[in-house]
Image (spheres, grey):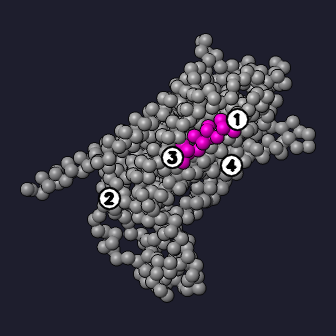
Amino acid sequence: MTARQGVAMAQATTEQELRKSMKRERREQVYEVFERMAYHGISSNLILYLTKRLHQGTVASAKNVTNWVGTVWITPIFGAYVADAWLGRYWTFLIASAIYLSGMSLLTLAVSVPGLRPPTCSDPDPTRCRKASTLQLAVFYGALYTLAIGTGGTKPNISTIGADQFDDFEAKEKAQKLSFFNWWMFSIFFGTLFANTILVYIQDNVGWALGYGLPTLGLAVSILIFLAGTPYYRHRVPTGSPFTRMAKVIVAALRKWRLPIPSDPKELYEFDLEKYTQKSKFRSFRIDPTRTLRFLNKACVKAGPSTPWMLCPVTQVEETKQMLRMIPILIATFVPSTMVAQINTLFVKQGTTLDRKLAGFSIPPASLAGFVTISLLISIVIYDLYFVKIMRKWTKNPRGITLLQRMGIGLVLHIVIMLIASLTERFRLGVARDHGLIENGEQVPLTIFILLPQFVLMGTADAFLEVAKIEFFYDQAPENMKSLGTSYSMTSLGIGNFLSSFLLSTVARITMEHGHHGWILNNLNASHLDYYYAFFAVLNLLNFIFFSIVTRIYVYKAEVSDSMEILRRGSDSI
């Protein structure tokens, strides 16, 4: 065999592996499409079910929605722990998906059986209607939170399993991963679009049983499709608890806090290079010591007993640093996650006060969230096909701009969104006042499409912030802690929803003190959501200032700089 034939054969093998990688990750995308359809089929319209069927007030129903959504997005950190420490990503996902499906099935039952919900009430003030019984609430919320437990194991692992199908040690596969999260978000948001349009229409006009039954069936089918691909997946074995690994570093550094750090990095403890270079089912990087969070380097100082809680290798210390360095960035994403929570709560409630007729067709208020999805899909295509290529020529960065710059653009858009939402609501209240609709809370003679700008811009902001957030926390997490890194982005959404609940109840209570009318009431025509949204705009501005500060001092993980040449070679070849 000639050298040229050998090169050609190697290239053919690489192309074949790349095609296999893409086929493997498509099965995960199929699951995620149906999972998003199930999740958004519930969350998009949940506030209307709570007010119209369970007869809860505006503040109570909005809090219950954001508390549940917050739980859905906070549990992935526990699922990531189980995956990285014990079961691995595949088995954690599989068990959690069974729990998810059982929760969806019970929820469908809860909205289908007449005895599991209170009787219908036509009073415009739901607080005057008959309340749901303890049993009815127990079954309904039991189903919701069973579902939330299931998502804790599926959400941090399904995207990670998909990204794992690309080998970081192969140039073309590593380059393909640059676009993976863009197209991952693009494909799965078709499930979101279906939920925000077709499913919410079915729920509003046909029935909740069918509206919840369809995504339950789809979820079951997607799990079977995922199972069919089991023999072809690249499986990552669990490498131990990431929290324990990090705790060992912190404890070892504290126990040796008096010791000086050697000036020569070679004097620090590290495993032999062969441990990292040997070919195995799970390959990882060796990381050189850095000067950031330098105190933790004391864990590598060779002194005292060589136990895991007294002496840690440099790579383990640097992995701990990587996870700790991301925490300020994580904190900066809490406020925009709070803004996202408004889509399925106050934005939807605003829609119920406006004219929803279009050519004889009644538009479900929750369906406006479909414009978030459409905007996001269009923005991702433009970003990946045009923006990245243009910026790559200027910056020489394979991604076009850095992930933190992309997130920063999304944060700026959130400021604009809340300013527009405040002005729009001020206009709506003015029309309600002119037509004498303040006290009776009746429908305002304005089309529901006046809310369109805030929904469309929210999708554009997601294309920058949410996609970059997922990719950033996955990319910057150590190889052995990818599931935990991915769960950071989901934890952000969880805390953002809990923060939304806290702000909503706090602002509602404070603004009603001392005989004041209050900003957030069951009657939105008598409320002042325009003040509330203006408060959010100021909060976003302060958060952007904080983000700007923490990004200036952020240091990207060590092996990124070493692999940029691999990325450039790969991006030049695709």
Q: Nearer the viewer, mark 2 or mark 4?
A: 4
Does the magenta segment cover residue 553?
A: no
Is residue 568 at all visible to an observer of this figure?
Answer: no
Task: Locate residue 291, reporting x and y percent.
Answer: 52, 73
Q: Amino acid at mark 4?
A: Leu
* Circle number at residue 215: none
Task: Locate residue 315, reporting x and y percent.
Answer: 43, 71
The Cα atoms of the two marked residues, 2 and 1, are separated by: 58 Å
Disc 4: which residue? 499
Disc 1: which residue? 133
Circles 2 and 1 in contact, beta carbons < 8 Å = no
Q: Nearer the N terminus, badge 3 or badge 1?
A: 1
Disc 2: which residue? 169
Taking the view exactly as shown, the residue that stands out farthest to the right is 514
Q: Residue at x 39, y 51 (%)?
A: 90
Is 568 on the left-hand or right-hand side of 496? left
Main SS class of the magenta portion in the image: helix
Is 274 on the left-hand or right-hand side of 432? left
Is residue 364 at all visible to an observer of this figure?
Answer: yes
Does the magenta segment cover residue 135?
A: yes
Q: Nearer the N terminus, badge 2 or badge 1?
A: 1
The Cα atoms of the two marked residues, 3 and 4, are separated by: 22 Å
Q: Nearer the viewer, mark 3 or mark 4?
A: 3
Region in magenta: 134-150
Label 1 crowd (10 A; few <14 / some 14-19 / many >=20) = few
Q: Amino acid at mark 1?
A: Ser
When the figure is inspected, residue 404 is found, relative to residue 301, above or below; the finding is above
Q: Nearer the N terminus, badge 2 or badge 4?
A: 2
